[in-house]
Image: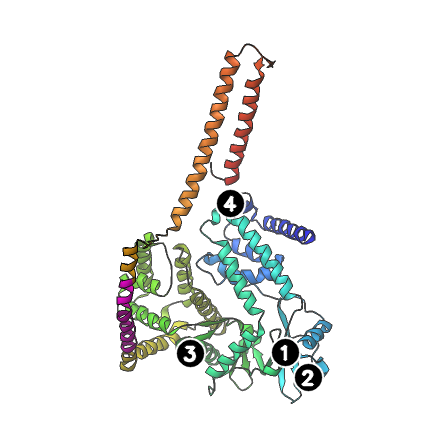
Amino acid sequence: MAAGSQRNLARVTEIGRVATRHGFGYLLERRRASNGDAESDRGRRLREMLDELGPTFVKFGQLLSTRPDVVPPDMIAELRKLQDDVTPFPIEEVERVVREELGIGIEQAFLSFDERPIAAASIGQVHRATLPNDEDVVVKVQRPTAPRQIESDLRLMASVARVVRERVHQLDFLDTGELVDEFARSIRQELDYKQEARNAEAFRRNFAGDERVAVPRVWWRYTTSRLLTLERLDGTHIRDLELDAWDDAERRDLAYRLTDAWMTMIFRHAFFHGDPHPSNILHLDDGRLGLVDFGLAGRLTDADMSRLTRLFIDAATENVAVLPRRLAELGVRYPREREDELRARLEELYYRYYGTRLSDIDPIEAIREGLALIYGMNLRLPTRFVILDKTIATLGSVAAEVYPDFNVFEVAKPYARQLVAERLSPRRLALRTQREAQELGEIALSLPRQIHDVMAGLADGELLVKISNPGVDDLAHHIDVAVNRIAVALVILGGLVGSSLIGVLAKSGPHFLGLHLISVLGFVISFAFGIWLLWGVFRSGRL
């Protein structure tokens, strides 16, 4: 236990040194960045700091890159460059994981198994292999030390989050503990390869019969929580394509098919691949697009799609005044006292692009302005929309790299129009009316019983009304602290006054340095209390 605490202390010290080396020492010293601290490259410095701290912090940086509600746009752009590349672990450890998970060795489980991985990350690495039935597959093997290392890092990050919350008042607007908790949930899901396999199977089912997109088959017999075996797709990663040798028509077609695949997932399937990175998309030999790496996926509910429809209709009819309410219905949270400011910012952004042809809009710039609005207004986004936002932003960047003149909004427009038409179809409206009528009927049936319970509680004097306001608790805490400090200050003042009177009036009894001994003791005690009070004030950082 002591050894573990010592290691954690050493790691925290290392984090402090690395933060200082990359120009973030001012946060630990409770001061603001000086004018000489260049903010223009803070995103680069943050990325390099997380990269130096290791794989878990790299993954944390990747999470931060999906949170435009807590991270400035310039930092998001840099954090999205983080790559989770690490040194592969040896084949002996791969053999051990396979034996522990399947109960047999690599030689018995596979006809062939390439010892050299084709990709390696902090959680696992991928090998080519062939099954006994001659099927070519890829096998994702979890790093043996990954769960233990990640849990250790998560405990450390939780400790760092507490320190940041207590000491770094520049980040008071950010709930660092909640952010670490979200990261912990995300990375623990990544440790379960069965969840990724279920995602892959859902995508394969959704694209069944689609001649544009290929999703690998899951070989469940060779899949566990630490081992994932998928059909091998033969093709070239988008990142490795020699696009300079392609003509404009071919590049535009590829960008269109990329975007079309994701619009299909978002607007038709309501279940989408959350990381359209060039490393996760293949251009297959038969011309189809191949998807890999299904660890991050987003899902939109039927209610989400209906609310998005109302948002699209209001935007199309220039009903900008209700957009804040529509965002709130989607789960977006913002300070209520800033609702008028949010409405004004939305109107400014809306009318900047209203009436402009989609072909004339720079999608990357529009997305960047949207991210700046989210961060500037301190909006809080539900996780599913954080993933959606990150997905569309990444998709727009990848499509623009493939074909610089491509506009993601032009592809999205017919899908959005189709969504609105489908949601407002007579059949949909009839089903919605039926469902809402049923819900109202249930409410009406339960109303007499609820009224009876309330009246019975009133008659028995047992009705309890609870009013909760988180701000009141904070106010009560601050008042307690202030009252305690005033009480200590009064004790100090009383001690000083009493000691002074004794020193002046007392003539007999023991003396020290010309003062009565009781007077000297009173001054010493008052001085000690004064030092303690000042230390508490300085520790809180609030004078």
Question: Residue 328 sits in which quadrant?
Answer: bottom left
Q: Residue furthest top?
A: 507
Bin the neighbour count of mark 2 within 10 Å (Cα to Cα): few under 14, some 14-19, many 20 and up.
Answer: some
Q: Between residues 71 and 296, which one lies in front from this camera angle?
A: 296
Q: Is residue 449 magenta?
A: yes
Q: Which amino acid does the dot numbered 2 rest on?
A: Phe
The reply to whether callout 4 and callout 2 are in contact (CB within 8 Å) is: no
Which is the main secondary structure of the residues drawn in magenta?
helix
Mark 4 belongs to which amino acid? Ala
Q: Residue at 54%, 35% (x, y): give it.
A: 535
The residue that label 2 is drawn on is 110
Residue 116 seen: no
Q: Secondary structure at mark 2?
A: loop
Q: Residue at x 50, y 72 (%)?
A: 276
x%, y% of residue 378? Answer: 40, 55
Give coordinates of residue 108: x percent, y percent.
71, 84
How many angstroms separate mark 1 from mark 4 (CA)? Answer: 48 Å
Which residue is drawn at the image coordinates 48% and 27% (left, top)?
491
CB atoms of marks 3 and 4 within 8 Å = no
Q: Secondary structure at mark 1?
A: strand
Mark 4 secondary-structure assignment: loop
Q: Work out whether residue 486 or residue 266 is closer to the camera in this orientation and state it.
A: 486
The residues bearing labels 4 and 2 have C-alpha atoms spaced at a distance of 57 Å
Q: CA distance from mark 1 to mark 3?
A: 27 Å
The three-letter amino acid code for the residue at tag 1 is Val
Residue tagged 4? 33
Which region shows up in magenta? 432-452
Numbered marks: total? 4
As drawn, the label of residue 269 is: 3
Contact, mark 2 vs mark 1 (Cβ under 8 Å): yes
